[in-house]
Every structure is written in C-alpha cells, then in structure tokens.
Image (cartoon, rainbow, N blue to C red):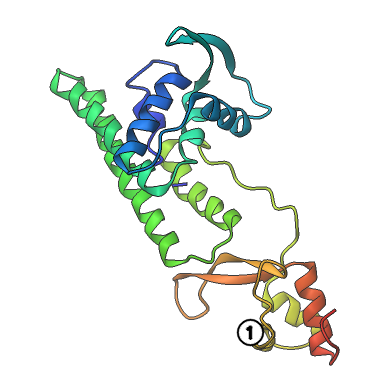
Amino acid sequence: MTGLNLANSFGSVTEKTIDSQELLALVNQARTSCGEKPVRNNVFIERIKDELDGETYKIFVGQKNGADIEVAEMSFKQAIRVAARESKSVRRGLVDKLEAMQEAHLTKGKSASGLVEFRQARTLKMTVDAVTNLFDLMPNLAAEARQTAAASIINPIVGFNAIPLPVLEEHYQTAGEIGADLGVSAQKIGRVANANNLKTEKYGKFFLDKSRHSDKQVEAFRYNAEGVKALRHLIHGADVA
C-alpha cells in the first residue's frame, strides 16, 4: 500500500511482537510531521480490529494517564498492514523514522546482520516509492488493482504476504473477451464504451494490463455484468437499460 518497510524494521524494536501503543506512537509522530492530526487510541484500536478481523492477536487493558485503555499486541506481519492504511506521506515518514532507528543501532556497533537489514530497508523504501509513483501516474486504477500490484512487488522482497491479494466479488471481462462474444473487435468495444461514457464504476473498473504495443503496464478498463449488458444493448441497436 504502499512506506511498507515495517516488518523488518519493527524487528529492531521488539523481538517477536509489537503492541498498539508502540505502533501508535510511531504513527502519530509521522502524522504530526506531515501536518495530519494524531489518531486517538480508541480510534486506532478500532482500526486494528477492523484490519485484523478473524485473526489471532491479543487485546488487554493497559494504563494511560491514570485511565484504563485497550492495548493490542500483534505480530509484525499484522502491524505492517495496520500501518499501511496511512496516507502516502505518513507511510514515508514512518519508513524514515524506522531507518533512523536502524542507523542508531548501527552506530552503536550493530552486527553485520544489522547492516544487511538496514540495506534491505533502503531497498524496500525505494521499491515502495516506485510503486507509489506508478499509482500517481495511473489515478484511475481500482483499489483491487493497486493492492494486487503492490502485493506482487512488495511481498517477494519482504519474504511473506505482507499485502494480501484481494478477493474479487465480481467477474470482470476485457474488451477482447466481450468483442469475441458479440462478434466485434475489441477496438469497437472501446469506441462504443467511450462514446457512451461506460468506463465508470457502475460498469466496471480499471486494472493493470500489458500494452498491446510495448512491454509497458497500462490502465485497462474491464467490464462487469452491467457493463457487458450495456454494451450488448448498444451494439445491437437498443438503448442502455
């Protein structure tokens, strides 16, 4: 989603898990530096519960300013997904902060393995920035397409499924698939869709696809059932229902 270099970096803070108070402190520090309002603990806990719904993690009562508060203890894999829900600028701030922590450890005589982790952190940050820039160039991409692209790039680097692949609740068809079914070219499908403003969320979504003329990845619209129905009506001379 995106500063997704949290799994390895959190490992330098605690050995196996991180609690929500530690994570919230890092998030709010990054938010403040980006001019965003800090997140309250109760809001952050609800965000954690929503993100980790159905998963195993600990919730216990802690103390803050003399009052009881909920505290969650989670794995680094879970923490990375919670932190990845922040905005692009905040994610970058988190990575910068965690890299500074890595450097501080190195200056205190961190072992060679720590140096490897630091270099991995820098590599991953560069990768995340590249993914973010790609999304900036393709603002129409569906959320599912962004998540799939981020997962395919980030997960192999971190070595685990930090970003899960999305589950598509609908079936989407390409212009070529619909054209073959209707007996027309993919180009005609595209012309009809453009002329009738069908490339909207009502009729489908934009996904990443390989350009027909190069190896570049481009935005390509795929149609849902409503989109196919509308194209069928238009191509056979009927009005869109």
Judge whether 144 appears above or below 85 on screen.
below
Bin the neighbour count of mark 1 within 10 Å (Cα to Cα): few under 14, some 14-19, many 20 and up: few
Q: Seen in the image, is 179 located left or right of residue 36?
A: right
Q: Quadrant of residue 10?
A: top left
Q: Nearer the viewer, residue 231 or 37?
A: 37
Q: Quadrant of residue 97?
A: top left
Is there any visible trace of residue 87 in the rendered image? yes
Q: Residue at x 61, y 29 (%)?
A: 52
Q: Secondary structure at mark 1?
A: helix
Q: Residue 3: percent from the left, percent from the top? A: 37, 42
Q: Seen in the image, is 206 located left or right of residue 25?
A: right
Q: Nearer the viewer, residue 102 or 216?
A: 102
Q: Residue at x 47, y 66 (%)?
A: 138
Q: Residue 128: percent from the left, percent from the top? A: 37, 48
Q: Residue at x 75, y 58 (%)?
A: 170
Q: Residue furthest bottom?
A: 237
Judge whether 201 appears above or below 232 on screen.
above
Q: Residue 167: percent from the left, percent from the top? A: 68, 48
Q: Quadrant of residue 32?
A: top left
Judge whether 35 appears above or below 240 on screen.
above
- The quarter of the image holding the C terminus is bottom right
Q: Residue 158: percent from the left, percent from the top? A: 42, 37
Q: Seen in the image, is 135 located left or right of residue 108?
A: right
Q: Residue at x 36, y 28 (%)?
A: 26
- The residue under label 1 is which amino acid type? Asn
Is there any visible trace of residue 94 in the rendered image? no
Q: Which residue is identified by label 1?
A: 194
